[in-house]
Image (cartoon, rainbow, N blue to C red):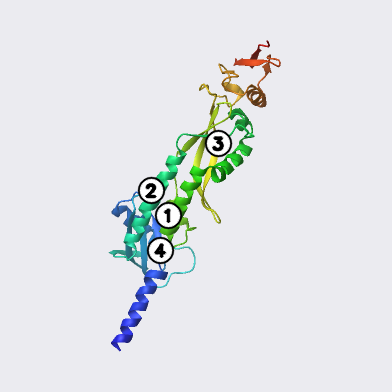
């Protein structure tokens, strides 16, 4: 009889830890913050005992809790859960704690590697369909698609960094016993806010691009790009973004593709005159731009 009871208890314990695992993220949280978030989350659970884990992915800190949820007045009526449960939280030891924290540190290291690979500037090849930052500004939707493809498919440094990060994320998800596509894992794979890189074009002009991570069901983690309007010529002259801020803008054939910049300015409904077939430089005043030419 004792043997049967022991076996039943063992089976219950295994199922409790292996199949009822529930993980919530709390990046950068102290223990008090973890428990506060845990208690709020527990209000969404049915009455009874639950094993809920809290994971600080950035700090590689894992903690499991036994959570008892009870509501007075008998069974809860159907409909939205109300914040009326009594929640008792007890810290417990979980067999996966060490492996989860170790995997989280590996993810953190791989994420650092990805950030480092994003530092500096990405130089586009001379045969790129986008020869100038002004071309990209004129066709922002097309450029976003183009640079997304370049970063995710054509740059070996990014591919290597992404592969390492995806491998680390899969290992972490396995240790946490959740799907790598779980919303919880997005907290482990976020680059954070305000991550930018500079795209340099064949004419030396450049455009700032915001970098974020996104999850692809087949490819895993990928880089998502959003082109900003922060562009400049090769000598650091800010390229205007509307006809209302063109005054004082100077450009020349050594710092920007003349044909591309003139076409872009005209797309802003800016009058551009002069230059002929030998366009050397240009200057913009309040009402338009003048291009000077010098044919030998």
- Residue in view at x 66 percent, y 16 percent: 279
Residue found 41% across the figure and 48% down from its top: 110
Spatial separation of the CA atoms under disc 3 and disc 4: 37 Å
Tag nearer the camera, 3 or 2: 2
Q: Secondary structure at mark 1?
A: helix
Considering only vertical position in the picture, is 226 above or below 288? below
**Location of mark 4 (residue):** 22
Residue assigned mark 2: 109
Quick check: marks 1 and 4 in contact, CB under 8 Å? no
Query: Residue 70, labelled with which disc?
Result: none
Q: Is residue 226 visible?
A: yes
Secondary structure, mark 4, is strand
Q: CA distance from mark 2 to mark 1?
A: 9 Å
Corner quadrant of residue 265:
top right
Pointer 3 residue: 227
Dividing the picture into quadrants, the one containing residue 202 is top right
Q: Is residue 167 above or below residue 209?
A: below
Of residues 237 and 51, which is closer to you in this image?
A: 237
Question: As rendered, which of 267 and 129 lies closer to the eye?
Answer: 129
Q: Are marks 2 and 1 in contact (CB under 8 Å)?
A: yes
Q: Secondary structure at mark 3?
A: strand
Q: Nearer the viewer, mark 3 or mark 4?
A: 3
Separation of residues labelled 3 and 2 (CA atoms): 27 Å
The label shown at residue 168 is 1
Residue lying at 49% horizontally and 68% vertically, measured from the top left: 78
State which mark lies toward you, 1 or 4: 1
Residue 81: x and y, percent? 45, 63
Q: Residue furthest bottom?
A: 1
Mark nearest the camera among 2 and 4 is: 2
Q: Residues within 10 Å of mark 3 (few under 14, many from 20)?
A: many
Quarter of the image with the N terminus is bottom left
Q: Determine which quarter of the picture holds residue 270.
A: top right
């Amino acid at each position: 009889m004792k043997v049967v009871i022991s076996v039943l208890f063992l089976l219950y314990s295994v199922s409790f830890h292996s199949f009822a695992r529930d993980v919530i993220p709390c990046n950068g949280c102290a223990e008090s913050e973890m428990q506060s978030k845990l208690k709020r989350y527990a209000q969404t659970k049915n009455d009874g005992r639950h094993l809920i884990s809290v994971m600080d992915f950035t700090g590689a800190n894992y903690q499991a809790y036994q959570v008892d949820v009870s509501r007075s007045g008998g069974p809860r009526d159907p409909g939205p859960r109300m914040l009326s449960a009594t929640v008792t939280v007890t810290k417990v030891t979980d067999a996966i704690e060490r492996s989860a924290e170790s995997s989280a540190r590996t993810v953190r290291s791989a994420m650092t590697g990805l950030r480092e690979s994003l530092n500096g500037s990405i130089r586009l090849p001379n045969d790129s369909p986008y020869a100038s930052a002004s071309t990209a500004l004129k066709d922002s939707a097309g450029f976003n698609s183009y640079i997304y493809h370049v970063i995710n498919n054509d740059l070996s440094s990014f591919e290597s960094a992404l592969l390492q990060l995806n491998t680390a994320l899969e290992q972490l998800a396995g240790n946490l016993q959740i799907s790598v596509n779980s919303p919880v894992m997005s907290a482990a794979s976020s680059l954070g806010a305000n991550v930018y890189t500079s795209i340099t074009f064949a004419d030396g002009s450049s455009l700032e691009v915001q970098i974020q991570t996104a999850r692809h069901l087949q490819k895993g983690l990928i880089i998502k790009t959003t082109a900003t309007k922060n562009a400049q010529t090769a000598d650091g002259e800010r390229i205007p973004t509307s006809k209302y801020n063109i005054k004082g803008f100077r450009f020349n054939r050594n710092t920007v593709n003349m044909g591309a910049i003139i076409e872009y300015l005209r797309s802003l409904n800016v009058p551009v005159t002069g230059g002929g077939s030998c366009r050397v430089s240009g200057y913009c005043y309040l009402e338009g731009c003048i291009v000077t030419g010098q044919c030998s």
